[in-house]
Amino acid sequence: MNYFIHHTAEIGENVIIGENTKIWHYAQIREGVIIGGNCILGKGVYIDFDVRIGNNVKIQNNSSIYHGSIIEDGVFIGPHVCLTNDKNPRSIDKNGNLLKEGDWKVGKIVLKKGCSIGAGSIILPNVIIGEFALIGAGSVVTKNIPDFALAYGNPARIFGEVDREGNIIKRSN
């Protein structure tokens, strides 16, 4: 295979990495992950088990992508972004016992083709971000965002439309 993995990166079992993909310093890729071709995963990126990543995806430094996430082709994820997977996180059950895998419901996140997620944003589970949508830095996305939408804030709201290159073509209040 023709890809680059920095010697400090940790790659789990049964990981598929596409051609010309680069995985940088201290990244951790868990078991069962599929990463397409021509991707860049920056320093300190964490990819949880069974995550799917398309082609031509950039995931910037220190981003965390948790189980249940699907990232389509051409997606940009800025630094320090977190894609979560538990809408009701708890460490213990009602009796004080530590929760184990299967004791909670995994929420799915889908980042559609060409969308961009700004630095420091948090995407909550059970959310779909539409094709070529643009999420502003520091946003907390709690609900679906349509194709070509410009959304930002906490919680993120739609403030306009963008084109395929991220240029604002319509602003709304």
Image (tube, rainbow, N blue to C red):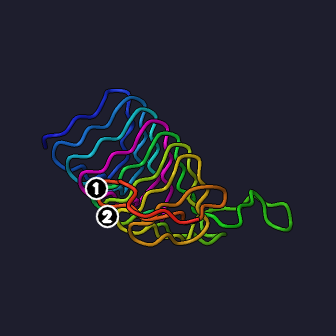
The label shown at residue 74 is 1
Amino acid on which disc 1 is placed: Gly
Q: Which residue in the protein does label 2 denote?
A: 113
Q: Which residues are magenta?
A: 48-68
Residue 153 placement (x, y as % from top left): 62, 55
Depth check: 13 or 124 in front? 124
Q: 76 left or right of 136?
A: left
Residue 2's image quarter?
A: top left
Residue located 26% across and 53% down the image: 16
Depth check: 82 or 94 in front? 82
Quadrant the N terminus occupies: top left
Residue 168 placement (x, y as % from top left): 40, 57
Residue 94 placement (x, y as % from top left): 85, 68
Residue 82 placement (x, y as % from top left): 54, 50
Q: 83 left or right of 40?
A: right
Mark 2 vs mark 1: which is more N-terminal?
1
What secondary structure is found at the residue carrying circle 1?
loop
Measured along the vertical axis of the image, is residue 62 above or below residue 151? above
Instruction: Tell me if residue 65 is in the magenta stretch.
Output: yes
Quadrant the C terminus occupies: bottom right
Q: Are marks 2 and 1 in contact (CB under 8 Å)?
A: yes
The label shown at residue 25 is none
Residue located 50% across and 47% down the image: 64
Instruction: Tell me if residue 163 is in the magenta stretch.
Output: no
Amino acid on which disc 2 is placed: Lys
Question: Magenta span: helix, strand or loop, mainly?
Answer: loop
Spot the residue most to the left.
Answer: 2
